Image (spheres, helix red, strand yellow):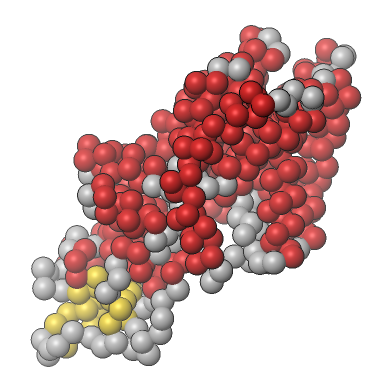
Amino acid sequence: MLDFITYHTPIFYLIQSIWRDEAFSYFMAKPNLPQIIINTANDFNPPLYYLFLHFWMKIVDRQDLWLRFLSVLPYIITIFFAYQLAARIFSKKFAFFVAVFTMFNPMLIYYAFEMRMYSFYVLFTISSLYFFYIKNWKWYSLTGILGLYTHSFFSLTVASYVIYLWFTNKLNRRTLFQTLLPIIFFLPWLPILIVQFFHSSNSWLFPVDLQLIGSVLGNLFTSYEGTPGDWWNKTFILSVFIVLFFLIALKRKRGQALLFIMPIFLPLFLILGYSMLRRPIYVNRYMIFVTVFEIMGISLGIWCIKNRSIRNLSALLWLLSVFFINIIISPYHKKTDFKTTFAEINKIARPSDFIYAKTPICFLESAYYYKYDNRVFIYNPNNITIPNYIGVNVVFPDVSKTSFPPMPSRIFLVDDDANYEMIVRR
């Protein structure tokens, strides 16, 4: 039972070894505040999460579990806002279902345990939706601004609200200004965003194909990104069911349904369309805000089923599906175990020893886990240019080495699979 809980439930996400993007977050948040903003401007995301993490690190230091807990906090608040929004739209009793449905969504729960900005991204999405719905424009503006400075794709949510108002004949000068107000406060970052966008042309992103388009709703609901390889048909079928419940909602509650459906299909149309016609910019986690609207759209579809027994059965089946998906997919989110490797290395390492990463891919994890992090380098004998998207250049611009250090020296040469060999130079 302990083995099952540890390795086949989302608790596994919390305790496993950190991976490259999480190590990148740590080193981005480590300098002083002005340097964090400068480094962020040279990367691809706004700075807000790194500023939060900077102060959190002063409390918890370099402890994996507690560093990840910074993402758990907004996840918990997200569940609260899901309940509050559902209580306004449906009933307090049905709001408990929506809260549980949100809490166990595989996409949200996966990123609730990752040292990245996506859990905050989700929180500001659901909270802005709540304040937009109740027309509390002051708090809507605040959550919108925070969302924009958390992830640039949040602007697609704001644009979707404008289109929703237009579709429902609620758009006028006042509502347009109130809805777009967060964008005005984001204007100082806009020139940086434009430069970042053009610099991102050299990217690792995979091309978008018809298989991805057909499965995208299911992928975003389950956090599926291609592993295991035989899930594409399953996420396609799930996408069909999601659309079915959207159609039920549209038939019964068109206005409310458009509020949830517009921020799904408009951003996906723009991002997937651009990715097919120009260059890939689609990444599951960048679109995590869509998952929030999927949850609410499905919930509205369930609520609109007139037969009470069928409605309750539908709610139960959706809950069982998310429980089942979490259990099945958790092991496929396993990260390379650098934690165990460096626990072994740190026991025998001396202050004069070096870590050389065989490739830039494993450098950030090595720098994070090695107890002498200023003695970690990339072994680059051919002096190949390291792509910016790996993240090394932003926080470690001078770590590439074409040769080993002078003799005498001991070097731990670490590979991408977390295996290593010791090289003794006398």
Q: Is residue 323 above or below residue 416?
A: above
Question: What residue is at 35 percent from the left and 64 percent from the top?
Answer: 394
Q: Is residue 317 above or below residue 383?
A: above
Seen from the viewer's position, the closer of residues 364 and 384 is: 384
Q: Is residue 419 toward the left or the right of residue 405 in the image?
A: right
Q: Is residue 305 toward the left or the right of residue 424 in the image?
A: right
Position of the C terminus, as image quadrant, is bottom left
Question: What residue is at 37 percent from the left and 90 percent from the top?
Answer: 382
Question: How many numbered marks does the figure carry?
Answer: 0
Does residue 168 appear anywhere in the picture? Answer: yes
Indicate the position of residue 41 as horizontal and vertical percent values.
39, 56
Image quadrant where residue 386 sits: bottom left
Does residue 26 appear anywhere in the picture? Answer: no
Indicate the position of residue 297 as horizontal and vertical percent values.
73, 29
Q: Is residue 306 above or below residue 210?
A: above
Question: What residue is at 32 percent from the left and 43 percent from the top?
Answer: 51
Question: What residue is at 69 percent from the left and 15 percent from the top?
Answer: 89
Q: Is residue 283 above or below residue 237?
A: below
Seen from the viewer's position, the closer of residues 174 and 198 is: 174
Q: Is residue 400 toward the left or the right of residue 214 in the image?
A: left
Seen from the viewer's position, the closer of residues 123 and 222 is: 123
Indicate the position of residue 181 as horizontal and vertical percent values.
54, 32
Indicate the position of residue 25 as horizontal and vertical percent values.
37, 52
Seen from the viewer's position, the closer of residues 91 and 137 is: 137
